[in-house]
Amino acid sequence: MSPFTLSKVTKNVPNLKMAKGLPKRTEDYSLWYNELVKKADLAEHSAVRGCMVIKPYGFSIWEKMQSAMDQMFKDTGHSNAYFPLFVPKSYLSKEADHVEGFAKECAVVTHYRLKNADDGSGLVVDPEARLEEELIVRPTSETVIWSTYKNWIQSYRDLPILVNQWANVVRWEMRTRLFLRTTEFLWQEGHTAHATRQEAIDETTQMLNIYADFAQDLMAMPVIKGVKTESERFPGAVDTYCIEALMQDGKALQAGTSHFLGQNFAKAFDVKFAGKDGKEELVWGTSWGTSTRLMGALIMAHSDDQGLVLPPKLAPIQVVMVPIFKSEEQLNAIREVADDISSKLKALGVSVKFDDRDTQSPGWKFAEYELKGIPIRLAMGPRDLENNTIEVARRDTGEKQTLDISGIESRINDLLDDIQSNIYQKALNHRDQKTYTVDNYDGFKSVLDEKGGFILAHWDGTAETEAKIKEETKATIRCIPLKSKEEAGKCIYSNKSSKGRVLFARAY
RNA sequence: CGGGGCGUAGCGCAGCCCGGUUAGCGCACCUGGUUUGGGACCAGGGGGUCGCAGGUUCGAAUCCUGCCGCCCCGACCA
């Protein structure tokens, strides 16, 4: 039951003002996103092209995500480790598909020293200091890690290896957007090694499920689990699984991937183990990752024209208290009550901020915390003091109510849960409403152009058809959903027979 | 890499076509006062290599040439 239904209601109207200077989603979604990222103090462009500065508030959200995921990894037996930033060029070229996939976007270190220019014009690269073998700034770490695993693994007793690393990687993208695609980004990459094929497949599935649970339970973002088609597969993987989410503008976003690597990297790096029977066998591998791109997903999944909307489980500050006062005495009186509520909330594990600055007006603070997506705002002034009440405003709906102070902490705690599930439900409704089942190419194109969203349609299973559709409509096969049922049909493009529907969308 | 746009105070911009006071406005900042239940108000104040380098000119933010940087749109990608 909603905590609000239990108490006296003085106001129940959405009362959110348009945030200062924030464009409307309906008018220019991508401008809205860019401005929101900056105005909510999440990140900004850096002096380096394509790279971003993640600001303290943005980073504190990322840290919440990190620690939640990290715990999930550890609960399933994984440990963190760290591997080098640099990859020798020769490593990257060992796995054919892998090098093919990444070669075009690698930053390369060629020299190790600078010197003063002879003409005094400043620093120049010392031509004498050329590296014998160039180093690649890691776009991902499979090659470094498998070259290391070779030394760690001799026998089946050394397996499995379940390692994750939190790191930065560099992919030299031509076009970047804050969080969604930057030249350097932060991520976690898990790399596991197993004695059997089945065990590696199970690991791949397990991690996919962890990502899906994280997205749904923590980010309040519904996702579809699926497997990538061959052309969308990770270079070097046998199978790539993914979770796909739908953003408010109807575009899809891949929120996490989990790869079954087969024995591809073991082959490339000659990683073998002796089984119980003494026979040598190649090791089976997986890798899986999520990145700061999740920040982009989080923003685009829930936020509105007033600013960020954060799920309580990832909000660095869950409850903010704003005192309304004219004098020092009033503030002190409010503080006494606020401190009490605050410590009760903290005892329940709720993070609280009491903003008693007298340099900003209450109205200013209201707008500011809405922009930053704080789930619950409490306001308390002289009137409340007198009546033993407090004003409670929820960010997701904009509803404001004045409630009795006694027992407020448990109501707030319940309200946080309520908000968490409400924004999930909202996102789920949005996705369901924007998921279309289409049976012909004209219908497919008109849904894409007029509505956007996920499209379930038949596909003949060929890369040619997939490429044609992409070329003509910019829509890609996001995945073959794991839950999809067998269903005979005709490919919307080629009219050839198809065994089931796949998930199409235009994507980030 | 193509197409477009922008670089003037911390941020957002005007001024530039048509060269000529002391380069201006809003926000932010500082001081004082009044305020504080939805981004307060009044008064005063500080802050500028006009992206960089050349050139034209008595005189350049403004005209010319070159360069640099960033953003947006496309091709590539998570």
Image (spheres, coloured by chain):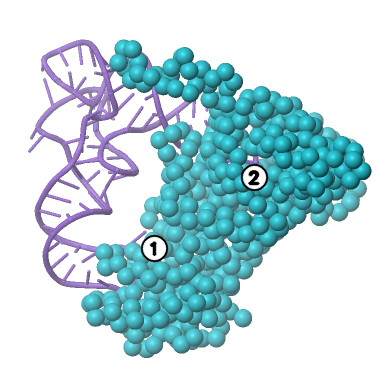
Chain colours: A cyan, B purple
Residue visible at 67% across and 28% down in the picture: A92
Name the amino acid type tagged 1. Ala
Chain that bears disc 1: A
Dot 1, crowdedness within 10 Å: few (<14), some or many (≥20)? Answer: some
Seen in the image, is A397 located left or right of residue A69? left
User: Splitting the image into 4 quarters, where does residue A273 fall?
Assistant: top right
Seen in the image, is A375 located left or right of residue A154? left
Whole-angstrom CA distance, mark 2 to mark 1, is 38 Å
State the residue position of label 2: A189
Chain that bears disc 2: A
Task: Locate the N terminus of chain A and report the quarter of the image it occupies.
Answer: bottom right
Name the amino acid type tagged 2. Glu
Q: Nearer the viewer, residue A372 or B57?
A: A372
Q: x, y percentage for residue A279? A: 90, 38
How many marks the image carries: the answer is 2
Residue visible at 34% across and 74% down in the picture: A323
Which one is earlier in the sequence, the residue at label 2 or at label 1?
A: 2
State the residue position of label 1: A367
Q: x, y percentage for residue A50? A: 49, 35
Please tell me whether mark 1 sits on a helix, a strand or a loop.
helix
Q: x, y percentage for residue A246? A: 65, 52
Q: x, y percentage for residue B69? A: 41, 29
Q: Nearer the viewer, residue A413 or A486?
A: A413
User: Splitting the image into 4 quarters, where does residue A357 fall?
Assistant: bottom left
Dot 2, crowdedness within 10 Å: few (<14), some or many (≥20)? Answer: many
Task: Locate the C terminus of chain A and report the quarter of the image it occupies.
Answer: top right
- Compared with A395, A435 (above or below) is above
Please determine if labels 2 and 1 lie on a single subunit. Answer: yes
User: Splitting the image into 4 quarters, where does residue A215 fall?
Assistant: bottom right
Seen in the image, is A313 located left or right of residue A121? right
